[in-house]
Amino acid sequence: MASSSPAPEAAVLAVFEACRRFAGSKAPPASLLHCGDIQKGFPAGGKERAYAHVGHWPDGTVCVDLPRFAKLSVEHQVGVILHELGHLARPDGGEKEADLWVFEALGIPIEYRGPKTLQWVPRAVAGRILLS
Ligand SMILES: [Zn+2]
Ligand SMILES: [Zn+2]
């Protein structure tokens, strides 16, 4: 039963930790939590894609819908997590403000790609972050 590929949860956590490490002290403290409420539309009226959100729990918790999030490409995973860190860094801002923080603080422009027009960064950027 041994497998060389990590469990989806471990892989997602590794991406999250890499993003946090890359942002360093520029981002507020953040931790990752699986959340089953994401597709229920929390926060009400939010425009989040149904993969992740912040503001559900205090103290910098980023919620992700782990099984679904794990199926995203790493380019999307990094894009979404950086975007969520942007929400933590600029809690009073909206969607554009979160991406603006990613660009101003980390120098990375967030793009929107794929069938769900989800946050995305180029593979080279994702690779640089994962190796940071
Ligand atoms: Zn949540
Ligand atoms: Zn957002």
Image (cartoon, rainbow, N blue to C red):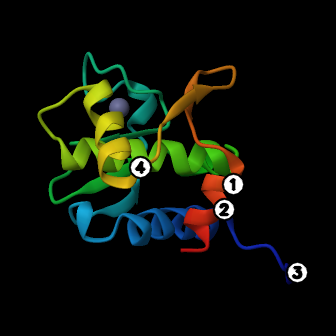
The amino acid marked with disc number 1 is Ala
Q: Position of residue 20 (x, y in %)?
A: 39, 66
Residues at badges 1 and 2 in contact (C-beta under 8 Å)? yes
Residues at badges 4 and 3 in contact (C-beta under 8 Å)? no
Q: Residue 1 carries which label?
A: 3
Q: Residue at x 66, y 62 (%)?
A: 127
Q: In which quarter of the image is the N terminus?
A: bottom right
Q: Which residue is drawn at 37% across and 49% down?
A: 63
Question: Which circle's residue, 2 or 3, is located before the other in the chain?
Answer: 3
Looking at the image, residue 113 lies above or below residue 77:
above
Cα separation, mark 4 vs mark 3, equals 42 Å
Q: Mark 2 points at which residue?
A: 127
Q: Name the secondary structure under disc 3.
A: loop
The picture quadrant where one finds residue 114 is: top right
Q: Which mark is residue 27?
A: none
Q: Name the residue under label 4.
A: 107
Horizontal placement of 111 versus 33: left or right?
A: right
Task: Out of 12 and 89, give the one closest to the viewer.
Answer: 89
Report crowding for label 2: few under 14, some 14 to 19, many 20 or more residues within 10 A (C-alpha): some
Q: Where is residue 118 in the image (x, y as percent from the top left)?
A: 56, 29
Cα separation, mark 1 vs mark 4, equals 14 Å
Question: Which circle's residue, 3 or 1, is located before the other in the chain?
Answer: 3
Task: Out of 76 and 127, give the one closest to the viewer.
Answer: 127
Instruction: Kindly tell me whether mark 2's CB lies below 8 Å from ligand 2.
Output: no
